[in-house]
Image (tube, grey):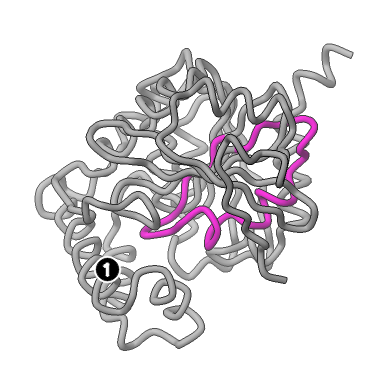
Amino acid sequence: MAARRIRCVLKHTALFQPPASLSAVIAAANVTSREYSTFKDRVIISAKQQVNGVDFHYEETGTGKHTVLLLPGALGTTRTDFLPQLTGLSASKYRIIALDLRGYGSSRPPDRDWPPMFYHRDADDVAVFMQALNIPRYSVLGWSDGGIVAMILAASNPASVHKLVVWGSNAYISDVDLQLYKNVQNIDDWSPKMKQPFIDVYGEEYFRKQWQGWSQAVLNYTTHRNGDICIDSLHNIQCPTLIVNGVKDPMVSQEHPAFLHKHIANSRVVDFPEGKHNLHLRFHTEFNSLVEQFLDEELLKQE
């Protein structure tokens, strides 16, 4: 089912009225643009917020007190990576925000570039973005590269990150990982099913250029940092952390969830025996239920 998108300006909000509380928090954040859509009767607000010289695109839904930020994988977008979470996580318990990182999706221009330590730059962008939205405390869900960014973010901003969920993520690049990255470096070797969603978003030329840029930037961690992406950050993560492990993930070897669990103090691992890299999409019902249970634990203890 395709999303139904309705463009509107503030003076015409009678056409499509979002929940008052959600509209108010968006207005207070001084966003540069916004529009509304519905998907499965869920109101989703799309907006842009200027941070660090970039108009960051994000989508927001839900009116709960607990803000949950969703960070995508490499070149991922709010809809390609998180539609089952935008429409499936509780709208009454959470304020759900999915973000396109700089140069991703609709957070363009400028085009994406790949400096050394680009994950740390992304984490800084996210921290300033949430400050610009006047959200001092929030939980973070990060998939793949988004999980790396989320871990750096949590380590650097312990007062801001309430809880952390990561999956398909790693803190270093092993020899096994290096071969996995090389295997997917050429998009001509990808299946149409794997490649087409990116081409639909970016066009083939931009996607090809950016995927080559990402591949080289990741490989540079092996030459410039001996494979270390964010190992030093792990011991600084103070928030409760859920590590979701796809046992059949072809992109992340099984050593990584164990390493994260060992080095993040207040963490746990939950295995999805049939889960691959995109387990949150294929098993979205089970994944969303697990995440909500984790996010709600303190509330349950207080009751």
**Residue 227 is a magenta residue:** no
- The x and y percentages for residue 109 are 25, 52
Along the line of sight, the residue nearer the viewer: 229 or 27: 27
Which image quadrant: the N terminus? bottom right
Residue 71: say if magenta: yes
- In screen coordinates, is 60 left or right of 258? right
Count of picture labels: 1
Residue range of the region highlighted in magenta in the rendering: 69-96
Give me the residue at 35% from left, 22% from top.
Answer: 156
**Which quadrant does the C terminus fall into?**
top right
Residue at image x 77%, y 54%?
286
Camera-side residue of 155 and 38 = 38
Q: Quadrant of residue 128?
A: top left
Determine the residue positioned at 59% across, 23% down: 25
Q: Position of residue 18 (x, y in %)?
A: 71, 38
Residue at the front extreme, as displayed? 11
Counting from the top left corner in percent of width and height, residue 102 is at: 31, 46
- SS of the residue at dot 1? helix
Question: Within 10 angstroms of label 1, few (less than 14), some, or many (20 or more) residues?
Answer: some
Q: Which amino acid type corresponds to the residue marked 1 in the rendered image? A: Trp
Q: Position of residue 272 (x, y in %)?
A: 68, 58
Q: Is residue 232 above or below residue 194?
A: above
Q: Quadrant of residue 266?
A: top right
Say if 227 sits above or below 252 in the image. above
**Residue labelled with disc 1:** 211
Q: Residue furthest left?
A: 224
Q: Foreground: 15 or 125? A: 15
Q: Is residue 252 left or right of residue 278?
A: left
Along the viewing direction, whichever of 63 and 11 lies nearer the viewer: 11
- Residue at the spot 67% in from the left edge and 69% down from the top edge: 2
